[in-house]
Image: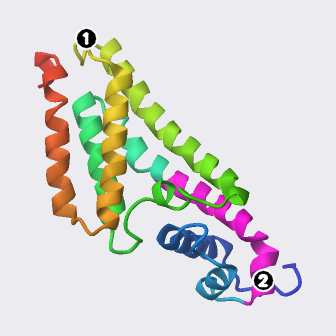
């Protein structure tokens, strides 16, 4: 039996997705509980009963977003060749950042960058998320070096830093209005920096 005040028709998963889009668009501090209640479309007591307070909803929204990234850009890094892995991951990020069905940019990049001291926990959590993304790149480059797809002199840590910085820059540019075509063109330039590090068989 659903808790008191919670309609039987309440779809928690759909509600969380809508809440995620609000945080994605407005950021943590720019989002109010009134925004969330309005977007979810049920009375406030039902929202509190289902999720708790704004902090709790935000944490769940970030976890949901991370799941989308894991099944999108991060999953693309599993391609068999390093060039295809990086290219596919970059292109999937562009699709994320410019999808007309969702807010522009990246929730993990923009939702909690500069926050009041009492919200520092969210800032730290998203920083760790970004570090995890960078580490995924590093591990993929290390594997490519081990497999002989990249030249021995290739530096996995530096490559991860470069491509993570590039992805984060694309997120900001998408927020400022860069189109999918614009960002895809930029991806081509970024990938050209990887080509000299590929062994001949991989080019």
Judge whether residue 57 is colored magenta: yes
The quarter of the picture where the C terminus appears is top left
The residue depicted at 63 percent of the width and 46 percent of the height is 124
Q: Which residue is mark 2?
A: 46
Q: Nearer the viewer, residue 172 or 189?
A: 172
Q: Nearer the viewer, residue 155 or 124?
A: 124
The residue depicted at 59 percent of the width and 84 percent of the height is 39
Q: Earlier in the sequence, mark 1 or mark 2?
A: 2
Q: CA distance from mark 1 to mark 2?
A: 57 Å
Tell me the crowding category of disc 2: few under 14, some 14 to 19, or many 20 or more residues within 10 angstroms, Cα based.
many
Q: Give x and y (percent) for residue 7.
A: 77, 87
The residue depicted at 32 percent of the width and 51 percent of the height is 169
- Horizontal side of 135 relative to 120 (left or right) equals left
- Horizontal side of 176 relative to 72 (left or right) equals left
Q: Give x and y (percent) for residue 98.
A: 30, 65
Q: Say which of marks 1 and 2 sits in front.
A: 1
Q: Which residue is mark 1?
A: 153
Judge whether residue 164 is colored magenta: no
Query: What is the residue that sits farthest to the front in this orientation?
Result: 117
- Residue 92's tag is none
Q: Nearer the viewer, residue 70 or 80?
A: 70
Judging from the image, what secondary structure is the residue with disc 1 in? Answer: loop
Magenta part of the chain = 43-68
Judging from the image, what secondary structure is the residue with disc 2 in? Answer: helix
Quarter of the image for residue 14 reads bottom right
Q: Main secondary structure of the magenta part?
A: helix
Label 1 with label 2: CB-CB less than 8 Å: no
Colouring scheme applied when the structure was drawn: rainbow
Q: Give x and y (percent) for residue 159.
A: 31, 28
The residue depicted at 35 percent of the width and 12 percent of the height is 146
Q: Is residue 150 above or below residue 103?
A: above
The quarter of the picture where the N terminus appears is bottom right
């Amino acid at each position: 039996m659903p808790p008191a005040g919670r309609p039987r028709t309440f779809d928690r998963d759909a509600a969380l997705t809508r809440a995620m889009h609000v945080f994605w668009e407005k950021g943590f501090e720019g989002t109010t509980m009134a925004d969330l209640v309005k977007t979810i479309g049920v009375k406030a007591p039902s929202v509190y009963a289902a999720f708790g307070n704004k902090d709790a909803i935000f944490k769940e929204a970030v976890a949901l977003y991370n799941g989308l990234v894991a099944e999108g850009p991060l999953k693309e890094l599993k391609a068999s060749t390093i060039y295809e892995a990086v290219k596919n991951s970059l292109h999937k990020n562009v699709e994320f950042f410019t999808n007309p069905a969702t807010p522009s940019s990246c929730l993990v990049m923009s939702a909690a960058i500069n926050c009041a001291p009492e919200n520092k926990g969210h800032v730290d959590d998203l920083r760790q998320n970004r570090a995890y993304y960078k580490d995924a790149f590093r591990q993929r480059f290390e594997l490519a070096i081990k497999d002989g797809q990249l030249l021995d002199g290739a530096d996995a840590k530096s490559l991860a830093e470069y491509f993570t910085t590039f992805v984060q820059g694309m997120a900001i540019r998408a927020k400022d209005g860069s189109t999918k075509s614009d960002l895809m063109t930029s991806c081509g330039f970024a990938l050209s920096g990887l080509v000299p590090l590929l062994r001949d068989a991989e080019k």
